[in-house]
Image (spheres, rainbow, N blue to C red):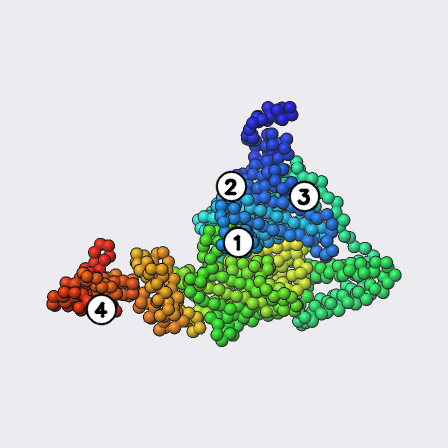
């Protein structure tokens, strides 16, 4: 009865699920309402956006399905009941790409299920994590997990931005404490015009790719790659993106007002005020002396902090020796100790512009650059900024060694430039597990690769597969940007004709989060080249890479609500000044790419053949090309347009391979003469191989000027004979003669 009434009232029938069109963003009612299913619609960046609740994922604390175009992502947010015994916010984000979403089956012959996430999926998960993390109370100890599962991919709209929007929305409508909403948008520029959430086709044409996320008032995450774009253009794109995603902020607020559950009251740890005062009185004077002792190296600095903490523990043991939970008090004192470091560092920088190592707020640490330090490499670059040290090693290889990539979003394609970032535990003076790269290594490596990609020469000018590995040998802030510098040096040392060297710098921020009067903006200081406590206790980590002419890569995380576009603009200006200083220091080691490749690097020669000759060059079952490789030691790669890349470690091998390829692909014409080999004898004549894999027929009448009764009377298998081309028909069949032509 109720269903019938609802159906009549909302223009829905018992036998249909027709959705009544209502104003954008308004709840759409039909008989789904009875089932608890709710749908909202909006248009965003010129494309339809739909959000559905109540159909999928009912056991999670918060769940929603986001559809953008025909790309669909399911987001579930879950929180554990019990607290985890840790001293950090246990938040995790998993972005799951499913091949069924794109109508693909991938894997080996034996395993067809998805295994570990792709690098692209890991990077998307990091983007979501970095955007939502600042909006949680970091004293929460209940585990929180956000899982974004791509259910459908239309090949046009990237699922990452719907997943980011959905992560915030799932948290907003859940009972999980979350100070949202946040939203994000991808910004591109095609033919001078900004494009929001560009399609894959538009992204290929765009001269930058910027993801910006934030709240109603602040920007809290940036991820960018750019084709050497001025800072002014980058700032304008970020500001435009911030304005654009406010539509999604308003939509979330509307939905949350109608659907959100009451947030759970969590037991959040708070400090004993008496203990805070005790720690402050005991530790602060010692911390001031330890934190601000210029001249100490990293080891001495942290040993000093460790010594103060040990003294604090002994003090607490004495002061609270009768306390029934002494060990808890010691742990709490340790947490307060870290907060005191944070408070002291903030206060001294904001009020006095006083940094722990004595530098000015816009001053770089000492710089040093070297090249060619490994005697048998294709190119090496060693870059030092303070005690951060990156050793980058270049390897050049044949075009055929390009990396093949296939993901849910990307059809089988090739990547010819790769940058890999390696962060061993000894780089920070620790003992740890060695092995494959984790999320940090993948993220930092991708940032550096994105920052270097715009300076790599195109394949038609430099047809090598290029790999640079950055070994972080010592880390004290901004190792990812040091890897950009070291890699630029290695590329130039190896003779790679890059467009211009690139360098990177990590910028920081200290902002006064105390309430201000008269709605004044909080006091803040922007820091150049952050390290140590500035990195750990700072409010922003903004990495910027680029050339002397503009930005190539950018990444920003914050620990506060976010920052204004004004701060972004000022930071980019300050970062450019630092970048130019770094480039000047790098120029002292090497000012431009070497004119010649390393003697240890292979040589690549490119030739063009008629595409119709590709089959002849390969031969039946690869016979011809494999014979050439075996005879010369060269690597040969062939593309569909007839481009042939020959890679050899020796001049002799290169020369021989080119000659054989030219011989095999030669366009035979009438009058050509060859020294050939008899490969087949028939009653009517013999077939003579004139080039590898190519033969022609000598008719019995063309064997000699004298009468020949039997072919075998004159010719034998394997016999070397001199022949002339008598003719080539339309099908390519070659007629030969052994009779010398008349002169």
Nearer-N-terminus badge (3/1): 3
Q: Quadrant of residue 2?
A: top right
For numbered disc 1, what is the local secondary structure? loop
Q: Is disc 1 surrounded by few (<14), some (14 to 19) or many (20+) residues within 10 Å?
A: few
Residue 201 point in image, percent of width and height: 45, 48
681 displayed left or right of 601: left
**Mark identifier at residue 194:** none
Q: Is disc 4 surrounded by few (<14), some (14 to 19) or many (20+) residues within 10 Å?
A: some
Residue at mark 3? 61
**In whole angstroms, how far apart are the C-alphas of marks 4 and 2?**
70 Å
**In whole angstroms, how far apart are the C-alphas of marks 4 and 3?**
86 Å
Question: Which residue is located at x 56 percent, y 35 percent?
Answer: 24
Tell me if I can see residue 240 in this picture.
Answer: no
The one of 464 and 475 positioned closer to us in this rendering: 464
For numbered disc 2, what is the local secondary structure? loop
In the displayed orientation, state which residue is furthest to the bottom: 375
225 displayed left or right of 736: right
Question: Which residue is located at x 56 percent, y 38 percent?
Answer: 50
Residue at mark 2? 70
Q: Quadrant of residue 62?
A: top right
Circles 1 and 2: CB distance less than 8 Å? Answer: no
The one of 666 and 331 positioned closer to us in this rendering: 666
Circles 4 and 2: CB distance less than 8 Å? Answer: no
Nearer-N-terminus badge (4/3): 3
For numbered disc 3, what is the local secondary structure? loop
**In whole angstroms, how far apart are the C-alphas of marks 1 and 4?**
54 Å
**In whole angstroms, how far apart are the C-alphas of marks 1 and 2?**
29 Å
Q: Is disc 2 surrounded by few (<14), some (14 to 19) or many (20+) residues within 10 Å?
A: some
**Mark identifier at residue 716:** 4
């Amino acid at each position: 009865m109720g269903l019938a009434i609802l159906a009549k009232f909302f223009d829905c029938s018992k036998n249909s699920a027709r959705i009544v069109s209502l104003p954008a963003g308004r709840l759409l009612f039909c008989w789904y309402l009875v089932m608890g299913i709710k749908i909202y619609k909006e248009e965003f960046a010129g494309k339809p956006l739909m959000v559905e609740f109540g159909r999928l994922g009912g056991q999670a604390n918060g769940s929603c399905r986001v559809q953008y175009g025909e790309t669909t992502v399911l987001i579930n947010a879950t929180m554990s009941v019990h607290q985890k015994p840790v001293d950090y916010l246990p938040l995790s984000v998993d972005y799951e790409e499913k091949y069924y979403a794109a109508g693909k089956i991938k894997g080996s012959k034996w395993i067809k299920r998805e295994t570990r996430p792709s690098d692209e999926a890991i990077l998307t998960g990091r983007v979501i994590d970095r955007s939502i993390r600042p909006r949680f109370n970091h004293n929460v100890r209940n585990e929180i997990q956000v899982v974004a599962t791509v259910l459908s991919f239309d090949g046009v709209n990237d699922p990452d931005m719907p997943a980011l929007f959905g992560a915030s929305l799932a948290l907003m409508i859940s009972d999980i404490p979350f100070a949202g909403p946040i939203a994000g948008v991808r910004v591109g520029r095609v033919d001078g015009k900004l494009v929001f959430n560009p399609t894959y086709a538009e992204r290929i044409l765009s001269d930058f790719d910027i993801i910006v996320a934030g709240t109603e008032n602040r920007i809290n995450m940036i991820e960018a790659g750019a084709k050497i774009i001025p800072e002014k253009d980058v700032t304008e794109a970020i500001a435009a993106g911030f304005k654009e995603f406010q539509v999604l902020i308003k939509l979330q607020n509307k939905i949350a007002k109608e659907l959100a559950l009451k947030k759970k009251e969590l037991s959040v740890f708070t400090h004993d005020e008496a203990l805070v005062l005790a720690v402050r009185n005991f530790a602060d004077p010692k911390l001031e002396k330890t934190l601000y002792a210029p001249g100490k190296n990293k080891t001495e600095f942290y040993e000093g902090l460790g010594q103060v903490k040990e003294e604090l523990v002994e003090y607490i043991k004495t002061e609270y020796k009768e306390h029934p939970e002494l060990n808890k008090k010691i742990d709490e004192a340790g947490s307060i100790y870290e907060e005191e470091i944070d408070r002291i560092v903030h206060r001294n920088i904001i009020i006095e512009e006083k940094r722990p190592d004595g530098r000015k707020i816009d001053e770089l640490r000492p710089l040093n650059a070297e090249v060619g330090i490994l005697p048998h490499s294709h190119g090496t670059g060693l870059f030092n900024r303070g005690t951060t040290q990156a050793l980058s090693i270049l390897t050049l290889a044949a075009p055929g060694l390009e990396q093949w990539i296939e993901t849910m979003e990307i059809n089988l394609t090739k990547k010819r430039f790769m940058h890999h970032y390696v962060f061993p535990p000894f780089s920070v003076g620790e003992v740890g597990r060695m092995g494959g790269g984790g999320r940090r290594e993948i993220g930092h490596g991708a940032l550096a690769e994105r920052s270097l990609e715009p300076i790599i020469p195109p394949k038609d000018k430099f047809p090598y597969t290029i790999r640079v590995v950055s070994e972080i040998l010592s880390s004290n802030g901004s190792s990812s940007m040091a890897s950009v510098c070291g890699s630029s040096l290695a590329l130039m040392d190896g003779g790679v004709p890059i467009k211009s060297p690139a360098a990177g710098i990590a910028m920081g921020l200290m902002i006064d989060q105390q309430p201000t009067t008269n709605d004044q903006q909080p006091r803040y200081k922007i820091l150049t080249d952050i390290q140590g406590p500035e990195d750990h206790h700072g409010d922003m980590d903004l990495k910027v890479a680029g050339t002397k002419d503009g930005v190539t890569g950018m990444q920003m995380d914050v620990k506060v609500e976010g920052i204004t576009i004004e701060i972004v603009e000022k930071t980019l200006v300050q970062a450019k000044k630092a970048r130019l200083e770094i480039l000047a220091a790098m120029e002292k080691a090497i000012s431009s790419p070497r004119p010649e490749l390393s003697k240890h690097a292979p040589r690549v020669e490119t030739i063009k053949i008629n595409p119709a000759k590709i089959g002849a060059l390969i031969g039946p079952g690869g016979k011809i090309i494999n014979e050439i490789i075996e005879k010369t030691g060269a690597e040969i790669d062939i593309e569909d347009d007839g481009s042939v890349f020959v890679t050899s470690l020796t001049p002799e091998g290169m020369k021989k391979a080119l000659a054989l390829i030219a011989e095999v692909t030669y366009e035979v014409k009438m009058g050509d003469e060859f020294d050939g080999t008899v490969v087949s004898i028939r009653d009517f004549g013999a077939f003579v191989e004139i080039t590898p894999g190519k033969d022609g027929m000598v008719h019995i009448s063309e064997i000699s000027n004298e009468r020949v009764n039997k072919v075998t009377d004159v010719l034998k298998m394997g016999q070397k004979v001199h022949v002339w081309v008598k003719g080539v028909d339309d099908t390519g069949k070659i007629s030969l003669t052994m009779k010398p032509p008349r002169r």
